């Protein structure tokens, strides 16, 4: 199989991006978190926070809702009764921030970034530098390629090297 120079560069660049990569912080308004003897409860613009995940950071005696992936933050789950506690999940979850829900991958309660994550049941995806699940077709194909030609225990450098060698041996570079 022959690839044009442009396609070869695109494949190499995409594999490089998946194997290598680094987050900002934003603070939210409209959240109110209250801690009492029964635990945490929260509201967003007056509505109780129920059945959702939120990133929060302790700030002295209080809690502050922050953007998911903010350094020092933890992911809290607010159940149907509105009680919040630190999440220890390892799965894809929708995290609420400023009224928007985006899908992130939690591993032992912390957001994963710049890597291929998932499991057989939910599928494997790439998560970007902010931890958001990337679902476009090209990235899905690249994830499938990287998973097919590397081991999950390989370092990023090793994955890049294996993918590069596979591409260079099996897809000849053609100069026009």
Image: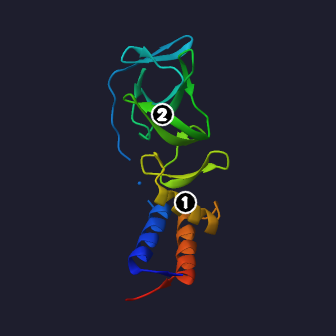
Say above or below: 168 vs 99. below
Contact (CB < 8 A) between labels 2 and 1?
A: no
Q: In the rendered view, does 148 fall on the left or right side of 17?
A: right
Q: In this orientation, which residue lies closer to the viewer: 61 or 165?
A: 165
Task: Characterize the local packing of mark 1: few (<14), some (14-19) or many (20 or more) Cα atoms within 10 angstroms.
Answer: many
Image disc number at residue 67 = none
Q: Quadrant of the C terminus?
A: bottom left
The image quarter containing residue 14 is: bottom left
Residue identified by numbered label 2: 95
Residue 20: x and y, percent?
47, 63
Task: Tell me the SS state at disc 2.
Answer: strand
Q: Which residue is painted at 55% across and 10% down in the image?
A: 37
Residue 147: x and y, percent?
61, 62
Q: Quadrant of the N terminus?
A: bottom right
Q: Which residue is painted at 35% across and 44% down in the image?
A: 24
Say above or below: 84 vs 121. above
């Amino acid at each position: 199989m022959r690839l044009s120079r442009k396609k070869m560069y695109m494949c190499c660049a995409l594999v490089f991006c998946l194997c290598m990569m680094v987050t900002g912080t934003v603070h939210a308004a409209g959240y109110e978190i209250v801690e009492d003897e029964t635990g945490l409860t929260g509201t967003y613009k007056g509505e109780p926070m129920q059945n959702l995940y939120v990133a929060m950071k302790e700030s002295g005696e209080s809690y502050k809702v922050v953007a998911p992936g903010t350094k020092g933050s933890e992911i809290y789950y607010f159940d149907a009764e509105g009680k919040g506690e630190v999440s220890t999940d390892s799965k894809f979850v929708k995290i609420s921030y400023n009224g928007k829900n985006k899908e992130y991958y939690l591993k032992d309660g912390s957001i994963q970034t710049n890597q291929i994550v998932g499991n057989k049941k939910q599928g494997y995806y790439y998560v970007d530098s902010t931890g958001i699940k990337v679902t476009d077709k090209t990235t899905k194909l690249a994830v499938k390629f990287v998973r097919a030609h590397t081991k999950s225990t390989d370092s990023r450098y090793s994955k890049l090297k294996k993918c590069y060698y596979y591409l260079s041996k099996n897809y000849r570079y053609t100069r026009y």
